[in-house]
Image (cartoon, rainbow, N blue to C red):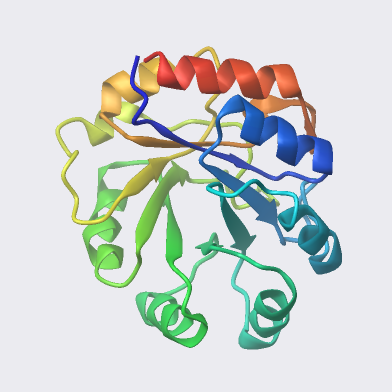
């Protein structure tokens, strides 16, 4: 059993979700501020949820191509430990956000083929962490949380990038151990894979996911 595996459960919307995620063993909890997502929460709701997060569990705010006006309001109202940039933010924008808000930044990179790996080294220079997620289908409304995976063999032998990285995309209790074995990843992210319906978290699925990840 690998107790070093760090787990992020994203898209929490209720106090019960937050407590269940923490009880299951999540290292990070994510709040989604993308209005088109079924996991969206308002700043006020997220603030109420954030105060319930146990000490030692990191609070991550997911935004998509957010401007300074939105980020100013978000960071003033919600006590976050990290910003997750899930849009088409440039390297310059990532560096700008990191400097302006003084929070660690995780940049999400969409992966569908070998050419997409080139961005990893480029963004490693400006982000604190990276998340490698399945590139969304062309007609997708959501940039992530679509329940699809990419070919994990693309990451074989590439365990030693300069920044911590997290694997996302279609993970659930049935496949997370295989994903960890294929990629050597030490951090995994889940949203739709622990839901009974879009945006509705399931405590038992969260527990099963964390057990499977740590048992890999």
Q: Is residue 104 above or below residue 181?
A: below
Q: Position of residue 117 (x, y in %)?
A: 27, 50
Q: Quadrant of residue 167?
A: top left
Q: Position of residue 36 (x, y in %)?
A: 78, 56
How many tags in the picture?
0
Question: Residue at horizontal 42%, vertical 84%?
Answer: 99
- The reply, left or right, for residue 150 in relation to residue 77 is left
- The reply, left or right, for residue 33 in relation to residue 159 is right
The quadrant of the rendering that contains the N terminus is top left
Q: Position of residue 5 (x, y in %)?
A: 38, 31
Q: Position of residue 38 (x, y in %)?
A: 80, 46
Most foreground residue, 161 or 82:
82
Q: Is residue 81 above or below residue 148?
A: below
Q: Is residue 165 above or below residue 108?
A: above
Question: Residue at horizontal 61%, vertical 65%?
Answer: 80
- The reply, left or right, for residue 80 in relation to residue 42 is left
Q: Most extreme residue toward the front, as rendered?
A: 55
- The reply, left or right, for residue 106 in relation to residue 50 is left
Q: Is residue 35 visible?
A: no
């Amino acid at each position: 059993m690998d107790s070093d595996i760090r787990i992020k459960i994203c898209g929490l919307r209720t106090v019960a979700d937050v407590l269940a995620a923490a009880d299951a063993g999540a290292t990070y909890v994510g709040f989604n501020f993308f209005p088109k997502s079924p996991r969206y929460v308002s700043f006020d709701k997220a603030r109420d949820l954030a105060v319930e997060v146990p000490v030692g569990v990191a609070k991550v705010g997911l935004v998509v191509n957010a401007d300074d006006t939105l980020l100013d309001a978000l960071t003033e109202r919600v006590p976050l430990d990290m910003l997750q940039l899930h849009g088409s933010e440039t390297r310059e924008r990532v560096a700008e956000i990191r400097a302006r808000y003084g929070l660690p930044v995780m940049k999400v990179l969409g992966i569908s083929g070998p050419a997409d790996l080139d961005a990893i080294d480029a963004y490693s220079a400006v982000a604190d962490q990276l998340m490698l997620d399945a590139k969304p289908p062309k007609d997708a409304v959501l940039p992530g949380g679509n329940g699809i995976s990419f070919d994990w063999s693309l990451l074989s032998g590439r365990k030693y990038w300069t920044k911590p990285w997290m694997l996302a995309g279609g993970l659930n209790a049935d496949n997370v151990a295989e994903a960890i074995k294929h990629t050597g990843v030490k951090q995994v992210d889940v949203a739709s894979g622990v839901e009974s319906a879009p945006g509705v978290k399931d405590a038992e699925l969260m527990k099963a996911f964390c057990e499977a990840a740590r048992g890999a």
